[in-house]
C-alpha cells in the first residue's frame, strides 16, 4: 500500500512537471512574432535578413544603382530616360540613377548636324537614328549600354579639294529606296565635313554638283557593313 502511494505521488509530480514544461514552451513568445520581412527577406532571432538588392529593418528599401549609356556614334545623342532629358556627346557616357529591379525606360536619337554655312540655317542632315531603351537597374554599381549605329547605315563625310564649291550632293543616286538629296554649300577648302547617316548598300555612291554646274560621282565604294561604319568622300 505504501509503495502504491509513493508511485501515485511520483506520477502526479511528473505529470505536473511535464505540464509546466509544455505550458512554458507553448506560452513562450517567438522572437520573430510580428516581424514582417518584405521582398523575400527572412526573420532570424527577431531581425530580417535581406536578399541582395534590399535593405532596411524590414527589407523594405531597394538599393540604388546606375544605368549608363555610352555614345559610340559620330554625333551627339539626345536621350530621355524615365522622363529625364540629357545629351551625350560623341564618345561620352551619361548615367541615370534608380532603384534596383526597376526599369530605365526611354528613347534616344541622333542625326548628322551641319556646320555653319554648309546648309542654309544649319540643322540636322541625313537619316535620324533611334533607339528604344529598357534596362533594369542592377543590384549595385553601374551597368552600361552602348549605343551603336547598326550596319545598315554609314556616316558620310565630304572633303572638297576641287576648284569650285559644292552646291548639293546626293547619296545613293539612282538607288530608288535609298536616294537622299541634300542642297548644301561645301567650300573648296580641303576641310572634312561630317554630313550624317545614310543607308548602306553594296553599291552605295555619292554624287556632287559644283557651283559651275558640272558633277562628279564616287561610285560603289566599299563599306565593311559593321556597326558605326563611316566613309569619307574626297572630291
Image (cartoon, helix red, strand yellow):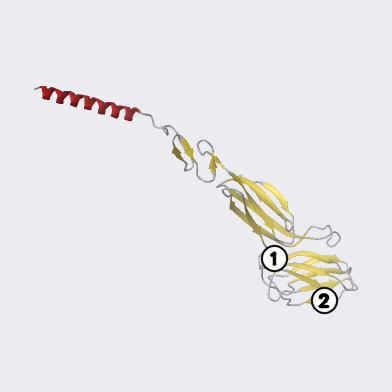
Work out how far the residue at label 2 is from the one at label 1, CA to CA, in angstroms: 26 Å
- Return the residue at label 2: 216
Q: Earlier in the sequence, mark 2 or mark 1?
A: 2
Asked if residue 197 is positioned above or below residue 64 in the image, the reply reads below
Left or right of 153: which side holds 165?
Answer: right
- The mark closer to the camera, 2 or 1, is 1
Nearest the viewer among 9 and 226 is 9
For label 1, the residue is 228
> Where does residue 41 sit, x and y in percent of width and height?
47, 41
- Residue 84: image location, x then y, percent: 67, 46
Say which residue appears at 67% left-offset and 66% top-offset: 227
Q: In terms of depth relative to the viewer, which is nearer, 219 or 121?
A: 219
Q: Are marks 2 and 1 in contact (CB under 8 Å)?
A: no
Query: Residue at horizontal 38%, vertical 29%?
Result: 29
Which residue is at the far front?
2
User: How many residues crowd mark 2 within 10 Å: few (<14), some (14–19), many (20+)?
Assistant: few
Q: Quadrant of residue 23?
A: top left
Number of residue marks: 2
| Residue at disc 1, secondary structure | loop
User: Percent position (x, y) of residue 20?
Assistant: 28, 26
Amino acid at each position: 500500500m505504501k509503495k502504491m502511494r509513493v508511485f501515485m505521488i511520483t506520477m502526479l509530480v511528473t505529470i505536473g512537471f511535464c505540464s509546466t514544461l509544455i505550458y512554458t514552451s507553448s506560452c513562450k513568445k517567438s522572437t520573430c512574432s510580428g516581424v514582417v520581412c518584405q521582398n523575400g527577406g527572412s526573420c532570424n532571432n527577431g531581425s530580417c535578413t535581406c536578399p541582395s538588392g534590399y535593405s532596411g529593418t524590414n527589407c523594405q528599401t531597394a538599393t540604388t544603382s546606375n544605368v549608363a549609356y555610352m555614345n559610340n556614334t559620330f554625333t551627339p545623342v539626345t536621350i530621355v530616360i524615365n522622363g529625364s532629358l540629357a545629351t551625350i556627346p560623341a564618345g561620352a557616357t551619361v548615367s541615370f540613377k534608380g532603384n534596383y529591379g526597376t526599369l530605365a525606360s526611354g528613347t534616344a536619337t541622333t542625326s548628322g548636324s551641319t556646320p555653319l554655312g554648309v546648309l542654309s540655317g544649319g540643322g540636322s542632315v541625313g537619316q535620324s537614328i533611334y533607339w528604344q531603351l529598357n534596362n533594369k537597374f542592377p543590384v549595385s554599381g553601374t551597368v552600361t549600354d552602348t549605343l551603336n549605329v547598326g550596319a545598315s547605315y554609314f556616316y558620310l563625310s565630304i572633303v572638297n579639294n576641287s576648284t569650285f564649291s559644292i552646291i548639293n550632293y546626293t547619296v545613293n543616286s539612282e538607288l530608288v529606296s535609298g536616294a537622299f538629296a541634300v542642297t548644301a554649300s561645301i567650300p573648296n577648302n580641303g576641310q572634312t565635313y561630317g554630313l550624317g547617316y545614310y543607308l548602306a548598300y553594296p553599291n552605295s555612291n555619292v554624287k556632287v554638283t559644283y557651283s559651275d554646274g558640272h558633277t562628279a560621282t564616287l561610285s560603289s565604294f566599299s563599306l565593311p557593313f559593321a556597326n558605326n561604319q563611316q566613309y569619307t568622300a574626297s572630291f
